[in-house]
Image: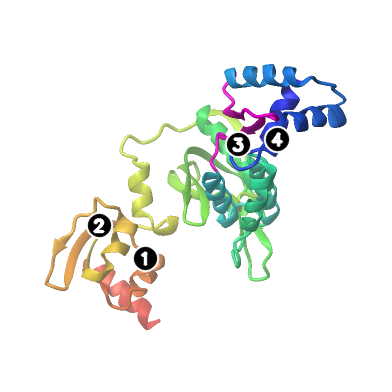
Amino acid sequence: RLLYIARTLYERTDEDHYLTTRQLVDILKTEYNLPTHRQTIAEEIKILQLMGMDIDVYKSTQNRIKLVSRKFEQAELKLLIDAVASSKFISTQQSIQLTEKLGELASCYKAEELKRNILVEGKVKTSNKKVPLIIDAVNNAINFNRKIAFCYFHYNEKKKKVLKNDGKPYVFSPYHLVWNGDFYYMVGWSDKHEKIATFRIDRVKEVPEILEDQAVKKPKEFDINKHINEAFHMFNSEKEEVTLVCSNDVIDAIIDKFGEKVKVKKYSDSFFEITETICVSNVFFAWVFGFNGKVKIQHPESVKNRYMNLLKQ
Protein backbone atom coordinates (compact mmCIF):
# COMPACT_ATOMS: atom_id res chain seq x y z
CA ARG A 1 0.00 0.00 0.00
CA LEU A 2 2.81 2.39 0.88
CA LEU A 3 4.40 1.85 -2.55
CA TYR A 4 1.10 2.31 -4.37
CA ILE A 5 0.46 5.57 -2.51
CA ALA A 6 3.96 6.81 -3.44
CA ARG A 7 3.49 5.84 -7.11
CA THR A 8 0.04 7.44 -7.30
CA LEU A 9 1.32 10.72 -5.87
CA TYR A 10 4.34 10.61 -8.21
CA GLU A 11 2.22 10.01 -11.31
CA ARG A 12 -0.91 12.04 -10.57
CA THR A 13 0.11 15.04 -8.48
CA ASP A 14 2.52 17.95 -8.76
CA GLU A 15 2.82 21.50 -7.44
CA ASP A 16 -0.38 22.45 -9.34
CA HIS A 17 -2.46 19.27 -8.89
CA TYR A 18 -3.48 17.38 -5.75
CA LEU A 19 -5.50 14.36 -4.64
CA THR A 20 -7.78 14.35 -1.63
CA THR A 21 -7.63 11.64 1.01
CA ARG A 22 -10.96 10.31 -0.31
CA GLN A 23 -9.59 10.12 -3.86
CA LEU A 24 -6.52 8.19 -2.65
CA VAL A 25 -8.73 5.77 -0.73
CA ASP A 26 -10.87 5.22 -3.86
CA ILE A 27 -7.83 4.66 -6.10
CA LEU A 28 -6.34 2.08 -3.72
CA LYS A 29 -9.65 0.24 -3.51
CA THR A 30 -10.75 0.28 -7.17
CA GLU A 31 -7.37 -0.02 -8.91
CA TYR A 32 -5.35 -2.11 -6.44
CA ASN A 33 -8.06 -3.88 -4.42
CA LEU A 34 -6.70 -2.44 -1.17
CA PRO A 35 -9.46 -1.22 1.16
CA THR A 36 -7.92 1.58 3.25
CA HIS A 37 -9.01 3.87 6.06
CA ARG A 38 -8.35 7.60 5.72
CA GLN A 39 -6.36 7.57 8.99
CA THR A 40 -4.07 4.94 7.48
CA ILE A 41 -3.43 7.28 4.54
CA ALA A 42 -2.37 10.05 6.94
CA GLU A 43 0.04 7.75 8.78
CA GLU A 44 1.65 6.44 5.61
CA ILE A 45 2.02 9.93 4.14
CA LYS A 46 4.12 10.75 7.24
CA ILE A 47 6.30 7.68 6.56
CA LEU A 48 6.82 8.76 2.94
CA GLN A 49 7.77 12.26 4.13
CA LEU A 50 10.31 10.75 6.53
CA MET A 51 11.72 8.75 3.58
CA GLY A 52 12.40 12.04 1.79
CA MET A 53 9.39 12.52 -0.49
CA ASP A 54 8.50 16.22 -0.61
CA ILE A 55 4.78 15.76 0.02
CA ASP A 56 2.61 18.72 0.96
CA VAL A 57 -0.61 18.14 2.93
CA TYR A 58 -3.18 20.94 3.10
CA LYS A 59 -5.39 20.32 6.13
CA SER A 60 -9.14 20.63 5.55
CA THR A 61 -12.27 18.46 5.76
CA GLN A 62 -10.74 16.54 2.85
CA ASN A 63 -6.94 16.82 3.11
CA ARG A 64 -5.31 17.86 -0.16
CA ILE A 65 -2.13 15.90 -0.83
CA LYS A 66 0.48 16.53 -3.53
CA LEU A 67 4.12 15.83 -4.39
CA VAL A 68 5.61 19.31 -4.76
CA SER A 69 9.17 18.60 -5.93
CA ARG A 70 11.10 15.91 -7.85
CA LYS A 71 14.64 15.06 -8.78
CA PHE A 72 14.23 16.94 -12.09
CA GLU A 73 12.48 20.28 -12.46
CA GLN A 74 10.21 20.73 -15.48
CA ALA A 75 12.70 23.11 -17.13
CA GLU A 76 15.49 20.55 -16.67
CA LEU A 77 13.40 17.81 -18.30
CA LYS A 78 12.69 20.09 -21.26
CA LEU A 79 16.42 20.76 -21.58
CA LEU A 80 17.21 17.02 -21.57
CA ILE A 81 14.46 16.29 -24.09
CA ASP A 82 15.69 19.05 -26.41
CA ALA A 83 19.23 17.61 -26.19
CA VAL A 84 17.94 14.13 -27.07
CA ALA A 85 15.78 15.43 -29.92
CA SER A 86 18.54 17.55 -31.47
CA SER A 87 21.29 14.91 -31.23
CA LYS A 88 22.08 13.52 -34.67
CA PHE A 89 23.76 10.42 -33.21
CA ILE A 90 20.48 9.28 -31.60
CA SER A 91 18.04 7.71 -34.08
CA THR A 92 14.51 9.04 -34.52
CA GLN A 93 12.94 5.98 -32.87
CA GLN A 94 15.36 6.14 -29.94
CA SER A 95 14.66 9.87 -29.54
CA ILE A 96 10.94 9.14 -29.23
CA GLN A 97 11.54 6.32 -26.73
CA LEU A 98 13.92 8.38 -24.60
CA THR A 99 11.55 11.35 -24.66
CA GLU A 100 8.70 9.14 -23.44
CA LYS A 101 10.87 7.80 -20.61
CA LEU A 102 11.91 11.31 -19.60
CA GLY A 103 8.25 12.29 -19.64
CA GLU A 104 7.57 9.61 -17.04
CA LEU A 105 9.75 11.55 -14.60
CA ALA A 106 7.04 14.23 -14.54
CA SER A 107 3.42 13.98 -13.42
CA CYS A 108 0.82 12.93 -16.00
CA TYR A 109 -0.19 16.61 -16.33
CA LYS A 110 3.34 17.93 -16.87
CA ALA A 111 4.24 15.05 -19.23
CA GLU A 112 1.70 16.41 -21.71
CA GLU A 113 3.66 19.67 -21.88
CA LEU A 114 6.82 17.77 -22.85
CA LYS A 115 5.39 15.94 -25.87
CA ARG A 116 5.73 18.98 -28.12
CA ASN A 117 9.52 18.64 -28.00
CA ILE A 118 9.84 15.09 -29.39
CA LEU A 119 11.57 16.08 -32.67
CA VAL A 120 13.51 19.05 -33.99
CA GLU A 121 12.22 19.96 -37.43
CA GLY A 122 14.61 19.28 -40.30
CA LYS A 123 17.23 17.55 -38.13
CA VAL A 124 18.98 14.67 -39.90
CA LYS A 125 19.22 11.73 -37.51
CA THR A 126 21.48 8.69 -37.64
CA SER A 127 20.08 5.36 -38.81
CA ASN A 128 22.49 3.44 -36.58
CA LYS A 129 20.26 2.21 -33.73
CA LYS A 130 23.21 0.56 -31.98
CA VAL A 131 24.81 3.89 -31.01
CA PRO A 132 23.82 3.72 -27.29
CA LEU A 133 25.20 0.16 -27.03
CA ILE A 134 28.41 1.18 -28.83
CA ILE A 135 28.88 4.13 -26.47
CA ASP A 136 28.31 1.85 -23.48
CA ALA A 137 30.90 -0.68 -24.72
CA VAL A 138 33.51 2.03 -25.36
CA ASN A 139 32.84 3.53 -21.94
CA ASN A 140 33.34 0.13 -20.28
CA ALA A 141 36.61 -0.37 -22.16
CA ILE A 142 37.82 3.03 -20.90
CA ASN A 143 36.83 2.20 -17.32
CA PHE A 144 38.57 -1.19 -17.42
CA ASN A 145 41.59 0.05 -19.43
CA ARG A 146 41.05 -2.42 -22.29
CA LYS A 147 41.53 -2.35 -26.04
CA ILE A 148 38.55 -2.74 -28.35
CA ALA A 149 38.15 -4.14 -31.86
CA PHE A 150 35.58 -2.83 -34.31
CA CYS A 151 34.79 -2.46 -38.00
CA TYR A 152 34.35 1.03 -39.41
CA PHE A 153 32.44 2.05 -42.52
CA HIS A 154 31.89 4.90 -44.96
CA TYR A 155 29.34 5.39 -47.73
CA ASN A 156 30.06 4.97 -51.44
CA GLU A 157 28.41 6.95 -54.24
CA LYS A 158 25.47 4.51 -54.21
CA LYS A 159 24.86 5.23 -50.51
CA LYS A 160 25.99 1.73 -49.61
CA LYS A 161 28.00 1.09 -46.45
CA VAL A 162 31.56 0.03 -47.27
CA LEU A 163 33.93 -1.26 -44.60
CA LYS A 164 37.24 0.55 -44.29
CA ASN A 165 40.61 -1.09 -43.64
CA ASP A 166 39.67 -3.85 -46.15
CA GLY A 167 37.02 -5.05 -43.73
CA LYS A 168 39.57 -5.81 -41.01
CA PRO A 169 38.76 -4.67 -37.46
CA TYR A 170 40.60 -1.68 -36.05
CA VAL A 171 42.31 -2.34 -32.71
CA PHE A 172 41.92 0.74 -30.60
CA SER A 173 42.72 1.96 -27.07
CA PRO A 174 39.94 4.43 -26.22
CA TYR A 175 40.81 7.29 -23.87
CA HIS A 176 37.81 9.62 -24.13
CA LEU A 177 34.27 9.86 -25.49
CA VAL A 178 33.65 13.31 -26.97
CA TRP A 179 30.35 14.90 -27.94
CA ASN A 180 31.42 17.54 -30.44
CA GLY A 181 28.87 19.45 -32.47
CA ASP A 182 26.34 17.03 -33.92
CA PHE A 183 28.30 13.83 -33.38
CA TYR A 184 29.80 11.51 -30.76
CA TYR A 185 33.45 10.49 -31.15
CA MET A 186 35.94 8.26 -29.41
CA VAL A 187 39.50 9.49 -29.11
CA GLY A 188 42.41 7.18 -28.37
CA TRP A 189 45.39 5.23 -29.70
CA SER A 190 45.00 3.40 -33.02
CA ASP A 191 47.29 0.40 -33.45
CA LYS A 192 46.97 0.65 -37.24
CA HIS A 193 47.88 4.34 -37.44
CA GLU A 194 50.33 4.19 -34.50
CA LYS A 195 49.10 7.53 -33.19
CA ILE A 196 46.16 9.29 -31.54
CA ALA A 197 43.10 8.91 -33.76
CA THR A 198 39.43 9.83 -33.74
CA PHE A 199 36.50 7.65 -34.84
CA ARG A 200 32.86 8.69 -35.14
CA ILE A 201 30.62 6.47 -33.04
CA ASP A 202 27.75 6.27 -35.53
CA ARG A 203 30.15 4.95 -38.20
CA VAL A 204 31.11 1.93 -36.08
CA LYS A 205 29.46 -1.11 -37.71
CA GLU A 206 28.67 -3.26 -34.67
CA VAL A 207 29.10 -3.08 -30.91
CA PRO A 208 32.90 -3.23 -30.37
CA GLU A 209 34.51 -6.32 -28.88
CA ILE A 210 36.26 -5.55 -25.61
CA LEU A 211 39.61 -7.36 -25.74
CA GLU A 212 41.64 -8.83 -22.89
CA ASP A 213 44.65 -6.75 -23.95
CA GLN A 214 45.49 -3.75 -21.79
CA ALA A 215 45.02 -0.40 -23.55
CA VAL A 216 48.10 1.42 -24.82
CA LYS A 217 49.15 3.90 -22.16
CA LYS A 218 48.06 7.44 -22.91
CA PRO A 219 51.00 9.60 -24.10
CA LYS A 220 52.15 11.97 -21.34
CA GLU A 221 51.88 15.02 -23.57
CA PHE A 222 48.33 14.24 -24.70
CA ASP A 223 45.72 16.82 -23.61
CA ILE A 224 42.14 16.02 -24.67
CA ASN A 225 40.96 19.63 -24.36
CA LYS A 226 43.83 20.85 -26.51
CA HIS A 227 43.14 18.07 -28.99
CA ILE A 228 39.48 19.10 -29.34
CA ASN A 229 40.28 22.81 -29.63
CA GLU A 230 42.88 22.20 -32.32
CA ALA A 231 40.70 19.91 -34.42
CA PHE A 232 37.97 21.62 -36.44
CA HIS A 233 34.95 19.32 -36.30
CA MET A 234 37.30 16.44 -35.44
CA PHE A 235 38.91 16.27 -38.91
CA ASN A 236 42.38 14.76 -38.62
CA SER A 237 45.09 16.71 -40.44
CA GLU A 238 48.50 18.23 -39.82
CA LYS A 239 48.64 20.83 -37.06
CA GLU A 240 50.23 24.19 -37.72
CA GLU A 241 50.58 27.45 -35.85
CA VAL A 242 48.42 29.93 -37.76
CA THR A 243 48.03 33.68 -37.29
CA LEU A 244 44.62 35.15 -38.14
CA VAL A 245 43.64 38.78 -38.51
CA CYS A 246 40.01 39.24 -37.54
CA SER A 247 37.48 42.05 -37.68
CA ASN A 248 36.48 43.33 -34.24
CA ASP A 249 32.85 42.37 -34.80
CA VAL A 250 33.62 38.62 -35.06
CA ILE A 251 35.10 38.34 -31.57
CA ASP A 252 32.10 36.29 -30.36
CA ALA A 253 32.68 33.68 -33.08
CA ILE A 254 36.41 33.54 -32.26
CA ILE A 255 35.69 32.93 -28.57
CA ASP A 256 33.10 30.29 -29.52
CA LYS A 257 35.75 28.50 -31.54
CA PHE A 258 38.89 28.91 -29.41
CA GLY A 259 37.50 29.62 -25.92
CA GLU A 260 37.74 32.58 -23.59
CA LYS A 261 41.46 32.01 -22.99
CA VAL A 262 42.35 32.85 -26.60
CA LYS A 263 45.07 35.53 -26.66
CA VAL A 264 43.90 38.59 -28.57
CA LYS A 265 46.34 41.24 -29.83
CA LYS A 266 45.35 44.57 -31.39
CA TYR A 267 46.19 44.73 -35.10
CA SER A 268 44.50 48.03 -36.00
CA ASP A 269 41.51 50.04 -34.86
CA SER A 270 39.19 47.67 -36.72
CA PHE A 271 41.04 44.36 -36.50
CA PHE A 272 42.68 42.11 -33.90
CA GLU A 273 45.18 39.26 -34.26
CA ILE A 274 45.31 35.76 -32.79
CA THR A 275 47.81 32.91 -33.16
CA GLU A 276 46.54 29.37 -32.58
CA THR A 277 47.65 25.80 -33.31
CA ILE A 278 45.11 24.59 -35.87
CA CYS A 279 44.41 21.40 -37.81
CA VAL A 280 44.77 22.89 -41.29
CA SER A 281 42.22 21.26 -43.55
CA ASN A 282 39.44 22.14 -45.96
CA VAL A 283 37.12 22.34 -42.96
CA PHE A 284 39.31 25.10 -41.51
CA PHE A 285 39.42 26.92 -44.85
CA ALA A 286 35.62 26.68 -45.15
CA TRP A 287 35.33 28.22 -41.69
CA VAL A 288 37.57 31.13 -42.74
CA PHE A 289 35.66 31.58 -46.00
CA GLY A 290 32.36 31.82 -44.13
CA PHE A 291 33.39 35.16 -42.61
CA ASN A 292 33.45 36.83 -46.05
CA GLY A 293 36.83 38.51 -45.53
CA LYS A 294 36.41 39.36 -41.86
CA VAL A 295 38.89 36.60 -40.93
CA LYS A 296 42.16 36.57 -42.88
CA ILE A 297 45.06 34.14 -42.80
CA GLN A 298 48.18 36.19 -42.02
CA HIS A 299 50.85 33.51 -41.46
CA PRO A 300 52.35 31.16 -42.51
CA GLU A 301 52.67 31.66 -46.28
CA SER A 302 52.24 27.92 -46.93
CA VAL A 303 48.74 27.97 -45.38
CA LYS A 304 47.84 31.17 -47.27
CA ASN A 305 48.90 29.52 -50.53
CA ARG A 306 46.88 26.39 -49.82
CA TYR A 307 43.83 28.56 -49.20
CA MET A 308 44.36 30.52 -52.43
CA ASN A 309 44.74 27.30 -54.43
CA LEU A 310 41.53 25.94 -52.91
CA LEU A 311 39.67 29.13 -53.86
CA LYS A 312 40.92 28.83 -57.44
CA GLN A 313 39.79 25.22 -57.64
**Which is nearer the eye, 34 or 85?**
34
Q: Which residue is mark 4?
A: 19
Q: Which residue is mark 1?
A: 284
Q: Amino acid at mark 3?
A: Ala
Of the two numbered discs 1 and 3 on the same chain, state the one appearing first in sequence: 3
Q: Is there any visible trace of residue 34 in the rendered image?
A: yes
The secondary structure type at the circle numbered 4 is: strand
Residue in the picture at 36% in, 48% down? 227
Q: Which residue is mark 2?
A: 276
Whole-number angstrom distance, CA of label 4 to CA of label 3: 44 Å
Of the two numbered discs 4 and 3 on the same chain, state the one appearing first in sequence: 4
Tell me if 132 is positioned left or right of 300 in this view: right
Q: Amino acid at mark 4?
A: Leu
Whole-number angstrom distance, CA of label 3 to CA of label 2: 35 Å
Span of residues in magenta: 51-73
Tell me if 13 is positioned left or right of 35 in this view: left
